[in-house]
């Protein structure tokens, strides 16, 4: 299938209000990540070559130790490939200094973590404002509006310890979307949640995807994986791509 056909097929499934351009927002060419030290070299990711198109929702699956976190850390510019080329929004991450990469990450990527990683002594709204601070400037009204969007408009002054796991995850989502990044990376976003909260988080991710965000989500949960348009499965550091529901998408080579 040609590249143009792939884009056309995905676009036909896009909702009308999608605003992102129809180009690859993430592309990897022969990406490897090795960890050296303590004797043997560990090959956590081997020769990964694939693209993710703007506006796509991709699930990354695979057993523990297969390289999911290694891959997501690189997609989030928290780590760099040992070899190969990684482009985010058409920019080769290898060409950027650490400072440039920090700036780039703040602009382009929102993170949603299984363990939430909220600052325990800051309230919900302050946690969201911290992400604004690292991006540009704080705006409490906007931060409260983001919490309202995830159904927490009435809990803005509460500390993480005063919120349930599901509520903390929603603060994490508000923090991820506050700077309107085109890409959302979610690492097991429902891993610590009960069924009711899983449904709330799934609905929020659906909403964000509908609004044009590219969503890359690591998940062990087959139900969550079926929400994605495509599955990228990892096994021993090797990448296998599968279509899941929605449009059939093949790798761009
Ligand atoms: N900092 C590190 N140093 C050495 N090996 C590592 C390091 N981080 C991860 N690994 C190894 O890389 C492989 C992939 O790990 P990881 O990406 O965390 O897998 P997953 O997220 O799928 O569980 C595993 O064999 C793991 O032990
Ligand atoms: Mg992991």
Image: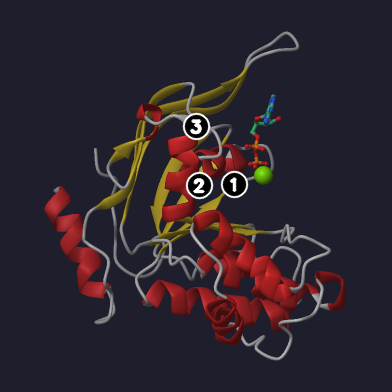
Residue 85 is left or right of residue 12, and the answer is: right
Return the residue nearer the eye: 127 or 51.
127
Residue 72 visible in rendering? yes
| Mark 3 crowdedness (10 Å alpha carbons): few <14, some 14-19, many ≥20 | few
Q: Position of residue 47 (x, y in %)?
A: 42, 27
Judge: label 1 CB < 8 Å from ligand 1: yes
Q: Position of residue 27 (x, y in %)?
A: 33, 41
Q: Position of residue 247 (x, y in %)?
A: 29, 67
Residue drawn at 51 percent across, 73 percent down: 205
Badge 3 is on which residue?
98
Residue 249 is left or right of residue 237, and the answer is: left
Badge 1 marks a residue whose secondary structure is loop
Snapshot quadrant of residue 212: bottom left
Residue drawn at 74 percent across, 72 percent down: 168
Question: What distance separates the C-alpha of mark 3 from that of mark 2?
Answer: 30 Å
Residue drawn at 25 percent across, 43 percent down: 252
Badge 3 marks a residue whose secondary structure is helix
Badge 2 is on which residue?
233
Residue drawn at 74 percent across, 58 percent down: 115
Which label's residue is closer to the chain start, 3 or 1? Answer: 1
Badge 1 is on which residue?
62
Question: What distance separates the C-alpha of mark 2 from that of mark 1?
Answer: 5 Å
Residue at far right of view: 161
The vertical placement of 94 against 244, above or below, is above
Badge 2 marks a residue whose secondary structure is strand
Snapshot quadrant of residue 230: bottom left
């Amino acid at each position: 299938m040609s590249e143009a056909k792939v884009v056309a097929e995905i676009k036909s499934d896009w909702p009308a209000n999608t605003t992102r351009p129809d180009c690859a927002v993430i592309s990897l060419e022969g990406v490897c990540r090795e960890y050296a030290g303590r004797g043997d070299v560990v090959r956590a990711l081997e020769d990964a070559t694939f693209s993710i198109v703007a506006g796509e929702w991709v699930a990354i699956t695979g057993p523990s130790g297969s390289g999911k976190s290694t891959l997501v850390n690189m997609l989030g510019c928290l780590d760099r490939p040992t070899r190969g080329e990684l482009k985010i929004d058409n920019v080769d991450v290898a060409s950027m200094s650490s400072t440039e990469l920090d700036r780039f990450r703040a602009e382009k990527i929102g993170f949603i973590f299984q363990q939430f990683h909220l600052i325990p002594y800051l309230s919900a709204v302050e946690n969201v404002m911290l992400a604004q601070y690292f991006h540009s400037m704080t705006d409490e009204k906007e931060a409260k509006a983001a919490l309202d969007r995830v159904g927490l408009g009435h809990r803005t002054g509460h500390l993480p310890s005063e919120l349930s796991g599901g509520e903390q995850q929603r603060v994490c989502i508000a923090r991820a979307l506050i700077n309107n990044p085109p890409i959302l990376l979610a690492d097991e976003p429902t891993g610590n949640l009960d069924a009711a909260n899983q449904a709330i988080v799934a609905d929020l991710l659906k909403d964000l995807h509908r609004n044009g965000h590219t969503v890359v989500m690591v998940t062990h949960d087959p139900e969550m994986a079926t929400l994605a348009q495509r599955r990228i499965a990892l096994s021993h550091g090797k990448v296998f791509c599968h279509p899941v529901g929605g449009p059939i998408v093949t790798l761009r080579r």
